Amino acid sequence: MARTALPGRLGERLRWRVATLAAHRDETAGARTLVLDVPAWPGHLPGQHMDVRLTAEDGYSTQRGYSLASAPGAERIELTVQQVDGGEVSPYLVAGMALGDQVEVRGPVGGWFVWRPESTEPVLLVGGGVGLVPLMSMIRTRRAEGSAAPFRLVYSVRAPADRLYLPELLDGTGTPTAVVHTRSAPEGSARPPSRLRAEDLTVHGWPAEQAPTCYVCGPTGFVEHAAGRLVALGHAPERIRTERFGPTGG
Amino acid sequence: MPVISRGFHGRKQTNQDRLPPGQYEVRDFPVLSAGPTPMVSTDDWEFTVVAESGTRRRWSWADLMALPSEQPTVDLHCVTKWSKFDTRWEGVSLDRLLEGVETTAAYALVHSYGGYTTNLPLEDLRHGRAWIAYRYDGADLSPEHGGPARLLVPHLYLWKSAKWVRGIELLAEDRPGFWEGAGYHSYGDPWREQRYRGD
Amino acid sequence: MSQTSVPTTTAGRPAPQPAYLDGNALAGPLSDVFAVDLTTAATHCTGCGAEGPLADLRLYGRAPGLVARCPSCDQVVLRLVRTPDHAWLDLRGTATLRIRVPAD
């Protein structure tokens, strides 16, 4: 059973820890999963994120937040980073960082956008692009814990080549998954490419009467749009949790 | 002592003598904002100077356009550590706008559409050191960079160059603006690295 | 309708895309100051009275500091500035901050 990873009392502040790149996996042409060794990692809840700090030799330092992709309980943690055009940090993490290289991490943090493995109510996950990352942590945790909580995922990408976590996403998660394409759909696809529609959520999601907890993650525009559709379909706003990603410098 | 990430270069430093302490040069023009971008039409735009007596002088967009303009080329220094050299602007000098405003006030509080404020000594708006700028790099100033018009006072950190400027209040006593009230330095001289209160 | 309409200015140019994130991204910076997670804390906007978790505030982070605004009325609820040796936290935009404290 994963530890709670949410300190509840004033006491020791989170400190920066050294993380060493132990392995990596290309997910798509522009996204890579980093597998990091972090000594004394306290564990995390699915949905939480970390701040990652990089310091150059001249002392210049910057940081970015990344969601944990892995389920808790493993020795190592995983992040999935999408390259941002003209970004400052993502090109290093996606292509420059080599095995043995180090960054500093602060985390896990975030108590809102989390799924607790002991919950049993239905869950609807709605991810846009790299917004899938924290949702994947939830999906992997559910599977690892043997949870019977009903999960469904609706995943919006521009084109099939942008799908993360293949083949696991379609074969190995145990969570029914529908992929919707916004710019170009596979040959013979019944659904023409378009932004996420209410119909995608009713066909592939849970009806509002089932009162699922909804987790929506992705770029701000996507989150506003998807959350708006869920509310319009009758999902209670207090059962919709959102996390917005965006360029904070790249 | 932070751990070094091998191979991470971040921003490169060049032109060291033109850089105030702690700054690095950028070639792009980062957009920083504390809120949604105000969308102000030039049909509705007004700029008002309010003296400590309460006397107001107001300019419409047409009034501003009718004034002689200048085309300063200046370096910009943002407190978030980036500097951009040789930026080209067009605008009306504050000396011209303050002409004929009767005041003994020592301080100014600058107000922007959207609610942003920043404060500085009135002297720092005079003597050819400040403009209401409406063109950048040969084109109309875009909303994300403060258009239709922004204050430009480049000898101080860029947070003093209030975007979407709408007016200036002249005050006998200094009053902290948006960032000055939240830990930033009241004056903000990049050459003395006055970033935070107490520096 | 597959596309929501893009707001335009009176001149017809499209307004910029949302440039904010949300209060989830405050979790790390606030952990410099507090060991308790505050993203689940309930805020109460002094401008319009809207209540909600800190995580739902609109976060503008590309600035000299972090600015979190009410998602209903855009009023500044919270400001966080980090200097080398201080964290300035301005909460004047929320009447209260309700923080869940686990029972002993």
Image (cartoon, grey):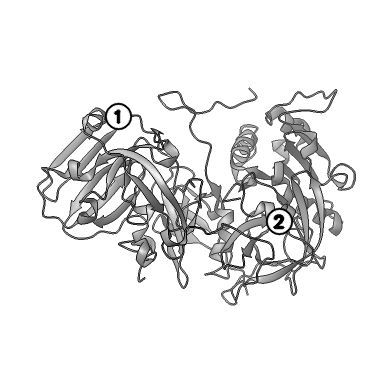
Residue at 61% across, 46% down: A86
Judged by depth in the image, the label closer to the viewer, 2 or 1, is 2
Q: CA distance from mark 2 to mark 1?
A: 47 Å
Residue at 64% across, 34% down: A234
Residue at 70% across, 27% down: A194
Which residue type does callout 1 highlight?
Asp
Identify the element where label 1 is drawn: loop
Query: Left or right: where does residue C62 sit relative to residue A176?
Result: left
Residue B68 makes an appearance in the image: yes
| x, y percent for residue A132 | 73, 46
Which of the numbered marks, if any, corresponds to residue A93? 2
| x, y percent for residue A26 | 81, 50
In the rendered view, would you say B192 is above or below A118?
below
Query: Left or right: where does residue C68 sit relative to residue A161?
Result: left
Query: Left or right: where does residue C1 sit relative to residue C19?
Result: right
Task: From the viewer's side, name the closer residue of A129 and C76.
Answer: A129
Locate the N terminus of chain B and report the quarter of the image it occupies: bottom right
Task: From the viewer's side, name the closer residue of B21 and C32.
Answer: B21
Q: Label 2 crowding class (10 Å Cα cut-off): few <14, some 14-19, many 20+? A: many
Residue A211 makes an appearance in the image: no
Residue under mark 1: which chain is it in?
B
For disc 1, the marked residue is B44
Residue at 40% across, 51% down: B76
In the rendered view, would you say B2 is above or below A173?
below
